[in-house]
Image (cartoon, helix red, strand yellow):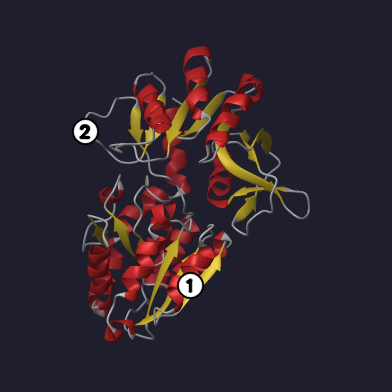
Amino acid sequence: MKKLVIISHTEHYKNADGNIVGLGSTVTEINNLLSVFDEVVHVAMLHNSPAPASALPYTSNKITFLALPAVGGPKVLDKLAIIWKAPQILITIKKAIKRADYFQFRAPTGIGVFVIPYLVLFSSKKGWFKYAGNWNQKKPPLAYSFQRWILKNQKRKVTINGLWPNQPKQCLTFENPCLTSNEINEGVVLTSNKSISKGGINFCFVGRLEEEKGVGLLIEAFKSLSNEEKLKINTVNVVGYGKRLNDYKSKAGDSGLNFEFHGFLSRNDVHEIYKESHAIVLPSASEGFPKVIAEAMNYGCLPIVSDISSISHYVKNEGNGFLIFPITKENLIKQIKKVLNLSDIQYAKMIQSQKEELSKFTYRHYNNRILKELLN
């Protein structure tokens, strides 16, 4: 029997039926970990707000959710609340780890400032850290910089995005899983018949609707296209939610384009958007390697993405996608125009060249690496 405790800041909610649901991408990853572990306990944050459509339930009673208070946020009071709740959080984590064989801590996160030092200095339990942010970020927030420094200077394994110069030996390059083998097979069939010249070109954005993710930049870039170029575009699908949603809708209203704002969608519904789209546009200023890039590529979406963090390790400019650097409106427009001018032959060649990378993002590949490289 192998029991894993995962500690994270992943958002969880109670749905209308009183059942626990959590952030879809993380919950799906954990559901698939039952091929490695006999039991999983997820220690994470429970929010007292309605569950978004993207939240999913755990699929087995071998997965247990253990609630932490929902702390963190941009305001000073939010950060003080983390300190105030720290003893309660540490007691909960200590009890959970005591009954486990392994732990995984998912960083960077606000509680990592005190949980990582606790695990490094006071716990002898086997385990590893998963750093999902930009490992090579030049000027990260102070809390993130502190967590990264500790992880570089301790002995347990750390899984990170990308392969970097002077990478400490305990830091292993690990792709974030997001695809099942069946979805890979479905993508092969779909992309073999996908065309860019019939019925207009569809673009999509998937993520939080905020300036840091480049939503405003995306809208301005599309608005700046010529009327002739806009006629080639069928729909720009925007999936996600943020406080500025109505502001973005207003900005897109006079664009001369069909912007569709979908809000939160289930994982299956997001995949349907990918199947209809020809490119995913993510002009973000800060990322690790977003799972949505690999998911979209699987269904024939060419990534138009920022050249930051480890993204260029998988997306090759004009090979299987398009990179934006520096992240400006002019550079984004330039890459959008390249997609608008692709022939069917060029498009087919690009989406087929994506297939080499996608197997690295399957749950099967990820779980095999956990067994071989983290548990032994």
Residue 165 is marked as 2
- Mark closer to the chain start, 1 or 2: 2
Which quadrant is home to the N terminus? Answer: top right
Percent across and percent down for residue 297 are 37, 62
Asked whether residue 5 appears in the rendered view, the answer is no
Give the amino acid at mark 2.
Answer: Pro
Q: Nearer the viewer, mark 1 or mark 2?
A: 1
Q: Residue at x 66, y 34 (%)?
A: 69
In this view, 289 is above or below 304: above
Which quadrant is home to the C terminus? Answer: top left
Give the amino acid at mark 1.
Answer: Ser
Residue on which the image places disc 1: 250
Q: Report whether 274 appears left or right of 167.
A: right
Asked whether residue 46 appears in the rendered view, the answer is yes
Q: Residue at x 56, y 49 (%)?
A: 28
| Image quadrant assignment for residue 356 | bottom left
Q: CA distance from mark 1 to mark 2?
A: 44 Å
Q: What is the secondary structure assignment of the residue under circle 1?
A: helix
Percent across and percent down for residue 198 are 36, 85
In this view, 340 is above or below 361: below
Q: Residue furthest front?
A: 76
Q: Report whether 27 appears left or right of 13.
A: left
Percent across and percent down for residue 370 are 45, 34
Q: Residue at x 51, y 23 (%)?
A: 114
